[in-house]
Image (spheres, rainbow, N blue to C red):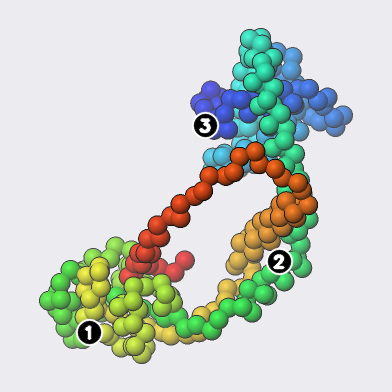
Amino acid sequence: MPHLETKRLRGRGAVVALGVSVLLTAVALPAQAKVLAKVNGVEISDDDVKTALDDLGSGLPRQLEGKARENYVLDFLIDEQLVVQKAQRDKLGESPDFAKKLAYLRDKALMESLLGKIAKDAVTEDAIKKTYDEAAKNQKPETEVHAHHILVPTEDEAKAALKRVKGGEDFGKVADEVSKDPGARGGDLGWFTKDRMVPEFAEAAYKLEPGQISDPVKTQFGWHVIKLDEKRPKVFPPLDQVREQVSRYVAQKAQSDLIVQLREGAKIERTEAPAEEKPAEKKPEEKKPAEKKK
């Protein structure tokens, strides 16, 4: 099992693993560190596991939690140390190329440490609330609708479906039987704004009043029968629902602001002019008639 786990986690490359391990083994363990394993006499502590968890966190299997997660990383560190010791015996750490890579890793670790501190300091409750309030204030008034639809290939099929629902059959039942939109169970599209749908569909849906059913509507996807359920002003999500996204934005903005500030105060000289990039050809955004609001 450990060798398989090493394969899963070596995405950062063997060089990174070797470089980090050399740095770890070169530093004396703090007095309070608890030794969890020894590999040919080299100690691996709970502090090492914590450092590795911070580094590898996003690459670990999601189903692992608590002690199982720590044991998984400890096995990785044991395998890593075995590989490191072999690399040291082969004197791979003495080459000029390795020294360059180690210097790069040191710079990268310093950068990540500073940016991490900047992000941590920036994400305060006041900053989160201020950012959220500004976003809520700047949201333009907009109407969103909740609708169902039936999507079929031909106009005749759309007319047949329309006849069934106007004859009293349940719209959702008919949709489940004939609609070609697999993403809308019972034809339910959820809540959406006008810009989320292709123009022909959006125009037809927004002309309806709650409870009304449209005549067949043609779009690039086929023929639709639309039933409008409700209309309402678009509701800005509560802070608790978007706290994670707001926190991420605050952190990233603080980091970006620092980079801009450092660039403005630095003397940066390029020995070669950057290559001119050709503007990418902008493709029209393809909208789906049954795209659910997430």
Disc ID at residue 8: 3
Residue at label 2?
128
What is the three-letter code of the residue carrying label 3?
Answer: Arg
Residue placed farthest to the front in the image?
272
Identify the mark nearer the N-term, 1 or 2: 2
Residue depicted at x 37% and y 64%: 284
Residue placed farthest to the bottom in the image?
209
Pointers 1 and 2 in contact (C-beta within 8 Å)? no
Q: Is residue 258 visible?
A: no
Disc ID at residue 215: 1
**Dividing the picture into quarters, in which one does residue 206 lie?**
bottom left
175 horizontally vs 244: left or right: left
**Dividing the picture into quarters, in which one does residue 199 lie?**
bottom left
217 horizontally vs 145: left or right: left
SS at badge 1:
loop
What is the three-letter code of the residue carrying label 2?
Answer: Ile
In three-dimensional space, the C-alpha distance between marks 1 and 3, rounded to whole angstroms, equals: 55 Å
202 horizontally vs 76: left or right: left
Residue placed farthest to the top in the image?
89
